[in-house]
């Protein structure tokens, strides 16, 4: 595990565990690794902590918290956590039969975060765009 914390008090960097199973070497603090879907668990944990602290509600519209994204007002925090918002998976989808349906291509695009959201439809051909979203509350 690697962690970097940056806040108003400064920065802390650390690592724990082993670099490779069966070996004793610790992971470097500046290493890279594929985190994949693990971020979903971290994000859900943090969101549920905010719910427990009464800072957000599970059934509150996400648009109340992220108005700059222009999301459908019916999409709730709970729907995002349950993957029932109807939003397209821009990174691609692994189907139950093991086949992979790619998302929007990212090659050659240097956008990240809000910049990607703002520019995501500027250079794609119509056939590259995602299908119409499902109504909130449904899964693809």
Image (tube, helix red, strand yellow):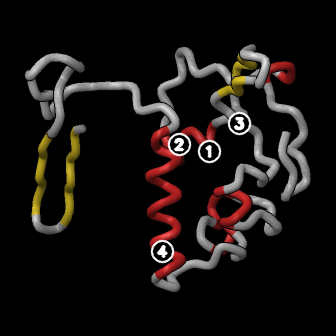
Circle 3 residues within 10 Å: few <14, some 14–19, many ≥20: some
Q: What crowding class fits label 4: few (fewer than 14 Cα within 10 Å), some (14-19), or many (20 or more)?
A: some
Provide the secondary structure element on which disc 1 rests.
helix
Q: Tell which circle, 4 or 3, labels the residue nearer the N-terminal end.
A: 4
Q: Name the residue that disc number 3 marks.
A: 89
**Secondary structure under badge 3?**
loop
The part of the image, by quadrant, that contains residue 15 is top left
Residue at screen point 76% across, 39% down: 88
Residue occupied by mark 1: 118
Q: CA distance from mark 2 to mark 4?
A: 26 Å
* Separation (CA) of disc 1 from disc 2: 5 Å
Task: Identify the residue position indicated by label 2 in the image.
Answer: 115
Q: At 21% across and 26% down in the image, what residue appears?
A: 31
Query: How many residues crowd around disc 1 within 10 Å: few (fewer than 14), some, or many (20 or more)?
Result: few
User: Residue drawn 32% across and 25% down?
Assistant: 33
N-terminal-most mark, 2 or 4: 4
Of marks 4 and 1, the one in the foreground = 4
Q: Which residue is mark 4?
A: 50
Q: Earlier in the sequence, mark 1 or mark 3?
A: 3
Q: Are marks 2 and 3 in contact (CB under 8 Å)?
A: no
């Amino acid at each position: 595990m690697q962690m970097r914390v940056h806040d108003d008090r400064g920065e802390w960097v650390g690592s724990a565990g082993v670099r490779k199973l069966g070996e004793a070497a610790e992971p470097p603090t500046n290493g890279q690794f594929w985190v994949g879907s693990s971020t979903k668990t971290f994000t859900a944990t943090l969101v549920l902590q905010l719910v427990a602290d009464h800072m957000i509600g599970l059934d509150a519209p996400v648009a109340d918290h992220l108005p700059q994204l222009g999301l459908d007002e019916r999409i709730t925090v709970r729907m995002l956590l349950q993957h029932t918002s109807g939003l397209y998976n821009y990174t691609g989808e692994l189907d139950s039969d093991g086949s992979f349906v790619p998302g929007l291509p990212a090659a050659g695009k240097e956008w990240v975060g809000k910049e990607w959201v703002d520019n995501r439809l500027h250079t794609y051909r119509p056939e590259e765009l995602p299908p119409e979203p499902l109504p909130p509350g449904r899964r693809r």
